[in-house]
Amino acid sequence: MYALFYVNKGSGYATYYDSVVARFAISARGTLTYDNAYVTVGKNSFTLDLYDNKLYVCSLGGMQNAGSGNADTNLCIVDLTNFTQTGVTTVTITNPTQKGDFRDISILDANNVYIFAGHYDSGFANLVGSVYHTTLANITTPANWTEVVAVNDPGYLWGIHADGSRLWFVKGTPIAVYDGTPTTAVTANRTFSITEMSDYTGGNLNSACFIAPSIPTTRGLNLAVASKSLASHIRLAKEARELAEKAKK
């Protein structure tokens, strides 16, 4: 079992140190034993996506800022066959303070990888950013990524999930759905508003979970048999709401 620990100073969220991915052994009786193996990844990390024996860790690089991203934001790829610091590949983007922080990743297959980066505007009213499409071969070369969705929208919970049939985008408060596996700029085929998911018009999404289908083939499409939870994004949503309230004062 691999566990991700983020490290900040005190109980606030102004100062972060490198996060840690630690490895545990699971016994036949279900107990955990730490085997003294760990690697460090970026600051304020919160995703731990597994694909092809590698962990993909999105790191904001610091606290969520108003008006800019963090210079230290990165995407760390941890090779589980070489679980040492030399087995960690760090991906950075040009002009991260403008393009924003690494916020999520979803890997469908070798030809379809989606990465979301963005930052809040000066008043925490909107998040400005992009969802990019790339391939595993180009994941370390952001210059070759293609923007498929441009973002300038309000809300606090953000996450993406590609299941082989659709690209799902938890887009602040609504959930936008894009059919197929888009590789160029697209508009949503369907958007679920807060009033379609709740009877409270002033509500905000706090988390979401995508459940894998029991039958991996639907309508002739081979779907990715995987589930994804945005539970780790709850902390960021809570902090963003708090920062937005402070900005109003």
Image (cartoon, helix red, strand yellow):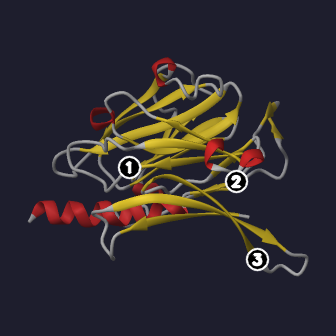
Residue identifier under label 2: 227
- The residue nearer to you, when weighing 190 against 20, is 20
CB under 8 Å between callouts 2 and 3?
A: no
Residue 32 - label: 3
Q: Amino acid at mark 2?
A: Ser
**In the rendered view of the protein, which quadrant contains the N terminus?**
bottom right
Report crowding for label 3: few under 14, some 14 to 19, many 20 or more residues within 10 A (C-alpha). Answer: few
User: Residue 33, image x and y in percent?
Assistant: 76, 76
- The residue nearer to you, when weighing 220 against 41, is 41
Residue at 29% x, 42% y is 69
Relative horizontal placement of residue 108, taking residue 13 as reference (left or right): right
Residue at 16% x, 51% y is 123
Residue at 83% x, 43% y is 216
- CA gap between label 1 and label 3 equals 30 Å
Question: Mark 2 or mark 3: which is in front?
Answer: 3
Residue identifier under label 1: 61
Question: Mark 1 or mark 2: which is in front?
Answer: 1
Which of the 4 image quadrants contains residue 52?
top right
Q: Amino acid at mark 3?
A: Leu
Label 2's element? loop
User: Residue 4, image x and y in percent?
Assistant: 58, 62
User: Residue 191, image x and y in percent?
Assistant: 47, 42
Which of the 4 image quadrants contains residue 153?
top left
Q: Against 154, is 111 above or below?
A: above
**In the rendered view of the protein, which quadrant contains the C terminus?**
bottom left
Label 3's element? strand
Report crowding for label 1: few under 14, some 14 to 19, many 20 or more residues within 10 A (C-alpha). Answer: many
Q: Amino acid at mark 1?
A: Gly
Please report whichever mark, 1 or 2, sits nearer to the chain's N-terminal start.
1
Relative horizontal placement of residue 177, taking residue 74 as reference (left or right): right
Label 1's element? loop
Q: Against 156, is 30 above or below?
A: below
